[in-house]
Structures are given as C-alpha cells and as structure tokens.
Image (spheres, rainbow, N blue to C red):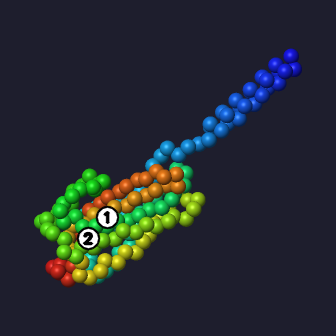
Amino acid sequence: MIMKKTIIFTAILAMALYVSCDKEERDTELPEIFMGGEEHFPHNCDTIYLGESFTFRALFTDNFELGSYSIDIHHNFDHHSHSTDVAECPMDAGKAADDPFLFIRQFEIPAGLREYNASQVIEVPEGVDTGDYHLMVRLTDRTGWQAIRGISIKIIDAESQPD
C-alpha cells in the first residue's frame, strides 16, 4: 500500500513538473517597424540630397525583447522591387550604375527593451549616382524573429533643383 502511494505521488509530482515546464511562454510574434509618423524619416518617396546627411528615425517594438536592426540603402536603377509600401513612387528612366551609393550597417539595440526609437545619422557623399534607391530596414528580436520594411527614396543633387 505504501509502495503504491509512493508511485502515485511520484507520478503526480513528475506530471506537475512536466506541465509547469511546458507552460513556459514562447515568442511566436514578429517584431514591428513603424516608419509612418511625422517624427519618422524617411517616408516612402522622400528625397535625400547628395553631400548631405539625414537622420533615419523609426520606432521598433516587440512583445518580448528587441535584438538588432540593419539599414540597407542600394540603387534601384533597374527598377527591381521589394518595397513593402503599397504606394508606388515616380521613377526615373532605368540606367546602368556608375558609382551608386551603398550603405549597409547593423546596429545593436540595448538589452531588455521592448520598444526602441531608432535614430541614425547617414551621410550621403558627393559624387554618387543620383536616382532611385531602396531603403530596407531589417529588425530582429532576441529570439530570432525578423521583420522587414522596404521603401523607395530618391537621391538627387540639391543644386540641380529649380528654385
């Protein structure tokens, strides 16, 4: 009788431990990228100028914890598409790249944050090709989920603009 009670008690204890471990919360949600507010920049179809810097601004959120983000700016002279914005921007005629602007950098987000206001100064050098570009943002949370946001921007020479 004592042996039977010991076996039942051990089985109940093992089951309780197994069930409690199984209830551990798991991250099943992607992080989110917000770039549509007035405080965010650039927006889809915005213009950036040669020889000037601009400040990339976006809001990142996650249900558990943020990890890192990357910014990729590359030419779109061949009119390829990976924009995640529904609005299409007016595009220049297709052309071959001579000296295109290329910016690819990754940035760590401080540990423990579920919300982060990203702000990154980006210099656009003189002499790079003007025209259509993509700006891609990749946001990864601490568990590995990734969100991607792509917009179209135009890089132009401010001096070539009519007054």
For image coordinates 29% across by 80% down, the residue present is: 125
Q: Residue 135 carries which label?
A: 1
- Residue 42 image offset from top left, x and y in percent: 33, 66
Q: Please identify the quadrant where the C terminus is shown.
A: bottom left
Q: Give the quadrant of residue 138.
A: bottom left
Asked if residue 84 is positioned above or below residue 108 in the image, the reply reads above
- Residue 35 image offset from top left, x and y in percent: 38, 60
Looking at the image, the residue that sits furthest to the right is 2
For image coordinates 23% across by 56% down, the residue present is: 81
Q: Which mark is residue 47?
A: 2
Viewer-nearest residue: 27 or 115: 27
Callout 2–callout 1 Cβ contact below 8 Å: no
Which secondary structure, mark 1? Answer: strand
Which secondary structure, mark 2? Answer: strand
The answer to whether residue 156 of the structure is visible from this angle is: no
Sequence order check, earlier mark of 2 and 1:
2
The answer to whether residue 26 of the structure is visible from this angle is: yes
